[in-house]
Amino acid sequence: MRISWRSTLIERLIVIGAMSGAVYALLALGFTLIYGVARVVNFTHGAFFMLGAYMFYAFGARGIFQLDPLPALILAAIFVGVMGGVTYLLTIHPIIEDELAVLVSTVAVALIIQQLIVLGFTNAFDSAYLAVPPFLSGPYFTLLGVRVARSRVIVSGISLVLVAAVMIFITKAKIGKAMRAIAQDREAAMLMGINTTRIVMLTMAISTSLGAIAGIFIASSTTGTAEPSMWLSPLVLSFAIVILGGLGSIKGTLLGAFIVGYAENAVVIGLPRGSYLAGAVALGIMVIVLLLRPRGIFGKRIELE
């Protein structure tokens, strides 16, 4: 009986940790992209994560347009991507050489987005605290003997596909190669005729879209809610993951996401009231890694490697 009980815990950790890591990778990838290309520590990333969840609700079956989940997700991602590009052009690009000013500006924009969401959704739906419907409904799946909601399995798979697609895009596509060129040497890229402002704005749009999709997946398949302060936790989580893997390193971000995903779920599953400690796990791991390896696991400053 004891062996069976332990086996069940291990199987649950393997399955749930993998699904958490997949969505965390999608969330942190956007944070890594904009830092890798423009060296911008984007504190609005969590706010766009939140905006994605709210726009999914607005476009979805319970919202204004009453669309099916997939069209609602696509429209929400496009909307947030456009907002991200505009935000970069208006609030980051003019001061991009001043890192402190960028930090202050992005925090201010995040708070503004939060307040606008509270105002807009309170007027439209009488509350900014919303119950987000599942991305997909249906029977549960059984993986390694663990019963898991169909919605969570699907969004984890989609997350991994999107991460792989972005990695291929950066490596093979012409625009992706331009992103890598700017990441390696911005001035040289400009001399080669690359419109750096346009490419960085596009990078910001892609980054915020990825964050928005991660927000939709987590709100619809894990927490089931959208509320105005939900942007803080994913922002901290993204920051911890990219620091853990190495700033600007995509493969480091992928590895860091799974490390955090498994560590959080190990605490939740293995400790009494472990859910209260889950939020501190990522930060604890980040501090330990910084003490042992200040540049992260991969130990390089080569952006988008």
Image: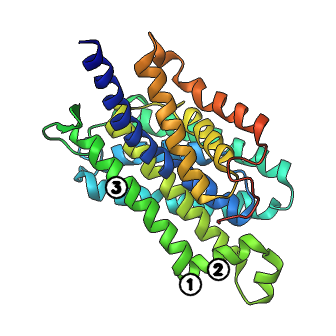
Residue located beneath label 2 in the image: 178
Marks 1 and 2 sit apart, C-alpha to C-alpha, by 6 Å
Q: Residue at x 79, y 75 (%)?
A: 185
Q: Residue at x 53, y 39 (%)?
A: 259
Task: Check the image and report above or below for 115 versus 93.
Answer: above
| Tag 2 near tag 3, CB within 8 Å | no
**Disc 1 packing (10 Å; few <14; some 14–19; many ≥20):** few
Tell me if residue 125 can be seen.
no
Instruction: State which tag comes first along the sequence, 2 or 3.
Output: 3
**Disc 2 packing (10 Å; few <14; some 14–19; many ≥20):** many
Q: Decide if residue 128 is on the left or right side of residue 58.
A: right
Q: Quadrant of the N terminus?
A: top left
Give the x, y percent position of residue 114.
57, 38
| Tag 1 near tag 2, CB within 8 Å | yes
Q: Residue at x 55, y 26 (%)?
A: 279
Instruction: Indicate which disc residue 174 carries.
Output: 1
